[in-house]
Amino acid sequence: KIIFVGRLMDDQNPLLLIDILKKHKIKNIQLDIYGEGPLKKKLLEKIKEEKIEKMIKLKNYKDKIYKILKNYNIGLSLAKHQTFNRTIVEFMKSGVLVLANDSGNNPFLIDNNKNGFLIKNNNPKIYQDKIFFFYKNKNMLRKFSNSAYKKYKNKFRAKDSSLKLYKAINE
């Protein structure tokens, strides 16, 4: 299962989800989209137009998304520009493999090809290829998921991050 969490606005790029899934080679793939925003109606129209209603489900926004992340294998982050993508950190904390646009602060969060993947120019074909690869290679999916969790544990836990920030400020 795949998840997208974000505002349904142009800067989060939710319409790209359609391009990623409409020509997908996997018939029983499931993408759940959690979010609200001005592009929701257009997103629903495009899903219907492409006849991929069985693949993509729009869900209502959730405050505590981390509680359901254990139900997913891959998280997509398509934002065009974002300084600190908290959703990526939440994905990593839950052991969800992250496929993200190579922009903003994402290269700081993801070690490309180690605990996730940075996709140049949000290329839909590369997203498709990665999803297909991990669908066929469950052991590799587990390996990358474990690496994502380790990165979270070693770099982003609130207690550790707060201590590092405190030390940096007081040097």
Image (cartoon, helix red, strand yellow):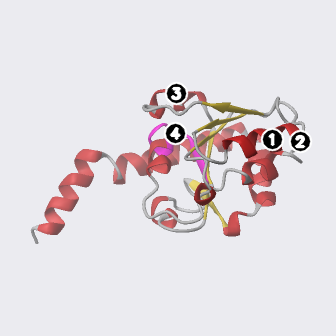
Name the image quarter holding residue 57: top right
Q: What percent of the width, then of the height, locates residue 44?
A: 76, 38
Alpha carbon separation for disc pair 2 and 4:
33 Å
Compare residues 163 and 78 and report the one nearer the observer.
78
State which tag comes first along the sequence, 2 or 4: 2
Q: Secondary structure at mark 4?
A: loop
Residue appearing at x 14%, y 68% in the figure: 169
Q: In the rendered view, would you say 36 is above or below 155?
A: above
At label 2, the amino acid type is: Glu
Badge 1 density bin: few <14, some 14–19, many ≥20, Cα 10 Å: few
Tell me the residue that label 3 is attached to: 68
In this picture, which residue range is highlighted in magenta?
91-99
Task: Determine which of the numbered discs, if any, sits on residue 95 in the image.
Answer: 4
- Residue positioned 67% across, 42% down in the render: 40
Q: Nearer the viewer, mark 4 or mark 3?
A: 3
Residue 134 shows up from this direction = no
Which residue carries the number 2 mark? 49
Q: Are marks 2 and 1 in contact (CB under 8 Å)?
A: yes
Membership of 93 in magenta stretch: yes
Mark 2 vs mark 3, CA separation in Å: 29 Å
Residue 169 vertical placement versus 37 (above, below)? below
Mark 2 or 3 closer to N-term? 2
* Distance between the alpha carbons at the discs numbered 2 and 1: 6 Å
